[in-house]
Image (cartoon, grey):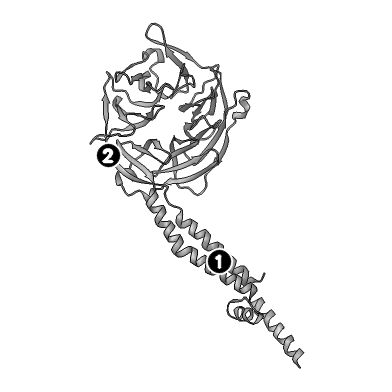
Amino acid sequence: MGVVARGLLVSLIVMMLASQNVLATSAVVIEENLSISEEDLGLNGVATDTDGTTALVYGLDGYVRVLDATDPSEQVEMVWNGVSELHDADFHPGGQTALIVGEHGVVLRYAKQDQSLERAASDVSLDYAKITAVAWNTAGSWAYLGTEEGQIWRMRAAEDGGAEIHALSASGTSEITAIDCHDTIMMCVVSATVEGIGIIERDHTFTWVGGSGYPWTGVECPSGETAYCIAIAENQIIAHIELNPEDISASIPSISRLQNLELYFVGIEAQEGDRALIATTPTSLVEHDISLNGSYPWLEHSDIDNLNLSSDRIVGTWATGVDSGWIVTSRGYLFQYAPNVSDQAGLLDMWIVIAIPAATGLVVLCLVYLVSPTRVKDRIIERIGNQDERNDLARRRARQQRKRR
């Protein structure tokens, strides 16, 4: 195939790739937003129950509010006798209660049945520590608590109405930034700022498995369908951790870094199945698919028109469908996202109207070149051929003239 033909094919490929770049836009759009309060609430996160009906937001000054996960305008503000900042929360696998943890050894228990919020353990039992992470184990028999000082405890209700608390051995010395437990495999993943990533096994044995030296900010075990959990570090680092109860060495993190992103990863939440959403700053969302081991733009900062979202920090998300759900920001704004159907249709129309006819024309031109008579090919070379092709054409014509003589 000559250079001209190759050039036509290259043009075709470039056009098709360019059309795909045109289609590369946010997968979702912001459809609705509302504000929990006129004040800046200083929220730190959100926790949702197992059936996706209730969401808890929490933050500064002991603030806790219960939201209807399908209609967040339906809300109940919870009140308790304290003002300690709250850092993390997790629903029991049964979905009827949740633990919320924070400064000064505070552990609160929320109960759906009577909409109550009360202390689940005494402050002194937890050394008045700053508790930064909490997660129920798979069976819901114990909750694991992590602290700023690197301690990890397991806790459950005691017969006397208090709490039974035990420290896990081999804890670290740096802040525990996140804990999450798998839905079906009796193992949990822990992240710390210095020691890296650790695994809690069924018998509460704790082992650091790797990933030291990365600023880990979150852990998520998205689904019972996969044996993997994900950890993220702020400098675009993603780790896959395989959970194998028979072989702890299988849980050594597989670490990769996303290239060409001027973003910092600040949090991660489950989306649907084995997909998760990574919250970033500047404000955006990145989808990570465990089965494909790939990350993709979900809500790009350039596509956010609402200043209350683009200038705020995302502290959590929850899903209401395959590609729909809600975003929570630090100030207390809620934003509903949904599939970008209209834009996809518009871009598809653009593809049909512009790209496909152009690509078809290039294909036809290429085929015409390949099957056209020599005289037509020669004219094409005269007009758009390179110097080598023109020299070859000149030599061929000279040979033809000598033969005629």
Instruction: Name the residue carrying label 2.
Output: 34
First of labels 1, 2 by sequence position? 1
- Expressed as whole percent of the image width and height from the top left, the position of residue 235 reads 48, 41
What residue is rendered at 76% in x and 89% in y?
403
Q: Secondary structure at mark 2?
A: strand
Q: Quadrant of the N terminus?
A: bottom right
- Expressed as whole percent of the image width and height from the top left, the position of residue 401 reads 72, 90
Label 2 packing within 10 angstroms: few (<14), some (14-19), many (20+) = few
Distance between the alpha carbons at the discs numbered 1 and 2: 48 Å
Instruction: Give 13 or 58, whichever is nearer the viewer.
Output: 13
In terms of image quadrants, where is residue 35? top left
What residue is rendered at 34% in x and 20% in y?
110
Instruction: Give 94 or 199, whichever is nearer the viewer.
Output: 94
- Expressed as whole percent of the image width and height from the top left, the position of residue 236 reads 49, 42
Q: Secondary structure at mark 1?
A: helix
Q: Is residue 187 left or right of residue 328?
A: right
Q: Quadrant of the C terminus?
A: bottom right
Q: Amino acid at mark 2?
A: Leu
On screen, residue 251 above or below 403: above
Q: Is residue 342 left or right of residue 244?
A: left
What residue is rendered at 57% in x and 28% in y?
243
Count of labels in the image: 2
Number of the label disc, if any, that sits on residue 11: 1
Q: Amino acid at mark 1?
A: Ser
Number of the label disc, if any, that sits on residue 106: none
Instruction: Give 333 or 360, whichever is nearer the viewer.
Output: 360
